[in-house]
Image (spheres, rainbow, N blue to C red):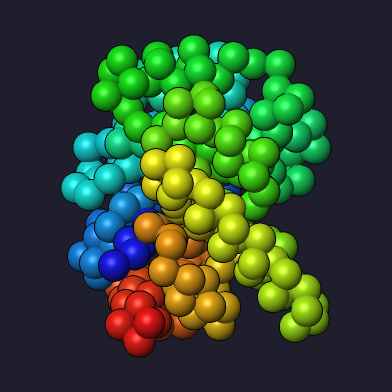
């Protein structure tokens, strides 16, 4: 059965609107776990625009399941992650434009020795994942670097405007996931996944874990955090029980 990790970036972003102490990502983490979430994910940006260093330390103590920290591969943030020691770090590529969304790691042009970085995290018992685009080169690059998992960027499917585009995106995700399994990598999926589009992804049967934040946060505004998480979990379980 696929797992669900809840991303709390939108909670931190909402807090930033008024630059106050609430809503607190740690409180949302507790509610998500009470509702059955298997993990908590959060992204630490270079500019600290939403998530603060203090959040990391609090979440490290509060989270009872698994804490996943998404980070760009910069030395100061790597050092911070090594200090906090989450259950897993997921490397993402950020951009000069701080408002641009992060993208998958491009191993063909990366000026960084990721294998060395992976070993540093493994040395302190931290699993390593890479956000990747759904193609074979990215899967192979993550495998060569020594990752234990890949987080497949599902935007090609979740942002499709036609049935043909959606099917093509879904096929690419399926192919990348199948290759990851062959290379003994755990398969995580995220980016743009919602209550309306998760069913085809879950039906693939090759995704070990979904990382979802925005859809749950928006739903929670209407029905509460625990119910929003529970509804997403039921969709995941129902699709796989029917598979």
Q: Give the image quarter of residue 75.
A: top right
Residue 34, horizontal then vertical, whole percent: 21, 65
Q: Give the image quarter of residue 118.
A: top left
Front-lying residue, 34 or 243: 243
Q: Disc count in the image?
A: 0
Q: At 29% from the left edge and 67% from the top edge, which residue is drawn? A: 1
| Residue 69 visible here | no
Q: At 64% from the left edge and 39% from the top edge, which residue is drawn? A: 138
Residue found at the far front of this picture = 182
Front-lying residue, 212 or 21: 212
Residue 128, horizontal then vertical, whole percent: 42, 32
| Residue 173 visible here | yes
Residue 3, horizontal then vertical, whole percent: 32, 61
Q: Is residue 218 left or right of residue 228?
A: right
Q: Is 115 above or below relative to 223?
A: above
Front-lying residue, 212 or 241: 241
Q: Is residue 30 left or right of residue 203?
A: left
Image quarter where the C terminus lies is bottom left
Residue 224, horizontal then vertical, whole percent: 37, 77
Residue found at the far bottom of this picture = 242
Q: Is 180 above or below relative to 125?
A: below
Q: At 58% from the left edge and 41% from the top edge, which residue is drawn? A: 139
Q: At 34% from the left edge and 64% from the top edge, which residue is drawn? A: 2
């Amino acid at each position: 059965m696929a797992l669900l990790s809840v991303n709390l970036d939108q909670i931190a972003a909402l807090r930033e609107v008024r630059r106050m102490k609430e809503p607190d990502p740690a409180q949302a983490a507790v509610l998500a776990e009470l509702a059955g979430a298997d993990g908590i994910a959060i992204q630490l940006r270079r500019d600290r625009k939403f998530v603060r260093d203090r959040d990391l330390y609090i979440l490290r103590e509060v989270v009872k399941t698994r804490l996943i920290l998404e980070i760009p591969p910069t030395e100061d943030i790597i050092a911070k992650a090594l200090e906090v020691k989450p259950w897993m770090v997921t490397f993402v590529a950020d951009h000069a434009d701080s408002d641009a969304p992060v993208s998958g790691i491009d191993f063909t042009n990366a000026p960084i020795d990721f294998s060395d970085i992976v070993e540093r995290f493994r040395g302190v018992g931290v699993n390593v994942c890479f956000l990747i685009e759904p193609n074979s080169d990215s899967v192979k690059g993550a495998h060569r670097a020594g990752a234990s998992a890949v987080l497949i960027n599902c935007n090609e499917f979740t942002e499709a405007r036609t049935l043909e585009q959606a099917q093509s995106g879904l096929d690419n995700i399926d192919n990348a996931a199948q290759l990851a399994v062959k290379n003994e990598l755990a398969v995580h999926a995220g980016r743009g996944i919602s209550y309306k589009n998760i069913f085809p992804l879950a039906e693939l049967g090759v995704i070990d874990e979904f990382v979802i934040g925005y859809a749950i946060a928006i739903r929670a505004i209407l029905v509460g955090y625990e119910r929003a998480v529970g509804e997403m979990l039921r969709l995941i379980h129902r699709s796989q029980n029917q598979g």
